[in-house]
Image (cartoon, grey):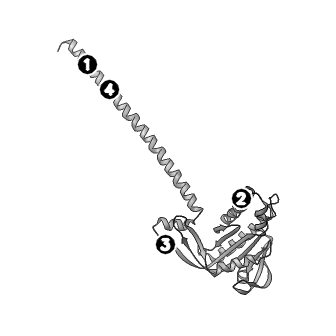
């Protein structure tokens, strides 16, 4: 082959080689771009999963989420020995009428956020808020005595949190009722499902709250006996609870040992 033909073939081969190298580089760049895009999508997916998990935790206890993820379609449990706390604010109707809507919501939000933090710190399960009422339960994990102690600590913490709001837009005062016994707990609803609790124990806790004095924690006598070595109680005597008759009750006033 003449030298001129050889040079021409070499030039053609070099051009082909450069095109091949350019194509390889484009493929590598495309692969890198896809890898970057895939990594970004996976990170976004993880972030969305985390947000979804946090939203679920605002509605359901972690152990209930775990059971749903495991495939349980119906969750309904009976707990034989738990402690239920009900609270509401004294004169809420008058307060809500006197405050601007935005101020009222801000005030309630601050109070309930404080209550949520107290529940979290004590390992207590917040169930729900209804208007100005707050419902929480201790001992759902089976630790009956520890759950009762946690609810007592929570009640004292809530009382303290309300009393410390000296710069509040209203004269917030709270009533709290606590009762112990069996309940039924489960999930109701579909598109707007909720974890809730039912039973006479819950009803009596609500009656104890409604008959409590402002700024006090009204407790069933049976629970006071159980916690007498950890907390201080003031006997109140018999109180007529609507639909439940006369019950011997006490006020929880503090912790033993100066706590």
What distance separates the C-alpha of mark 4 from that of mark 3? 63 Å
- Lateral position of residue 15 relative to residue 238, left or right: left
Mark 4 Cα shell of 10 Å, populated few (<14), some (14-19), many (≥20): few
Mark 4 or mark 3, earlier in chain: 4
Mark 2 crowd level (few <14, some 14–19, many ≥20, 10 Å Cα): few
Q: Which residue is mark 2?
A: 105
* Contact, mark 1 vs mark 4 (Cβ under 8 Å): no
Q: Position of residue 213 (x, y in %)?
A: 80, 75
Q: CA distance from mark 2 to mark 1?
A: 81 Å
Q: Earlier in the sequence, mark 2 or mark 1?
A: 1
Q: Residues within 10 Å of mark 3 (few under 14, many from 20)?
A: few
Q: Does residue 184 sit above or below 56 in this rendering?
A: below
Depth check: give the residue in front, 100 or 255: 100
Q: Nearer the viewer, mark 2 or mark 3?
A: 2
Q: Quadrant of residue 22?
A: top left
Q: Is residue 109 shown to the viewer in this render?
A: yes
Q: Is residue 210 above or below residue 118?
A: below
Label 2 – label 4 distance at C-alpha: 67 Å
Q: Residue at x 75, y 63 (%)?
A: 96
Q: Which residue is mark 1?
A: 10
Give the percent coordinates (x, y) of residue 48.
52, 52
**Residue 19, disc:** 4
């Amino acid at each position: 082959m003449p030298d001129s033909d050889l040079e021409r073939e070499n030039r053609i081969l070099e051009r082909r080689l450069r095109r091949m190298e350019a194509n390889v580089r484009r493929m590598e760049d495309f692969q890198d771009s896809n890898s970057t895009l895939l990594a970004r999508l996976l990170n976004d997916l993880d972030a969305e999963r985390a947000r979804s998990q946090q939203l679920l935790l605002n509605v359901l206890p972690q152990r209930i989420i775990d059971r749903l993820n495991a495939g349980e379609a119906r969750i309904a449990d009976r707990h034989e020995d738990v402690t239920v706390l009900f609270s509401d604010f004294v004169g809420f109707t008058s307060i809500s009428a006197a405050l601007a809507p935005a101020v009222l919501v801000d005030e309630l939000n601050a109070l309930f956020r404080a209550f949520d933090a107290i529940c979290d710190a004590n390992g207590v399960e917040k169930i729900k808020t209804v208007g100005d009422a707050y419902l929480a339960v201790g001992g759902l994990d089976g630790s009956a005595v520890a759950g009762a102690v946690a609810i007592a600590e929570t009640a004292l913490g809530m009382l303290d949190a309300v009393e410390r709001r000296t710069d509040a837009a209203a004269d917030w005062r709270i009533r709290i009722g606590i009762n112990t016994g069996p309940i039924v707990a489960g999930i109701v609803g579909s598109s707007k499902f909720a974890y809730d609790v039912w039973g006479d124990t819950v009803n009596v806790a609500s009656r104890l709250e409604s008959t409590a004095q402002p700024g006090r924690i009204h407790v069933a006598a049976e629970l006071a006996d159980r916690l007498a070595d950890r907390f201080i109680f003031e006997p109140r005597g018999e109180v007529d609870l609507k639909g439940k008759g006369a019950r011997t009750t006490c006020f929880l006033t503090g912790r033993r040992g100066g706590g």
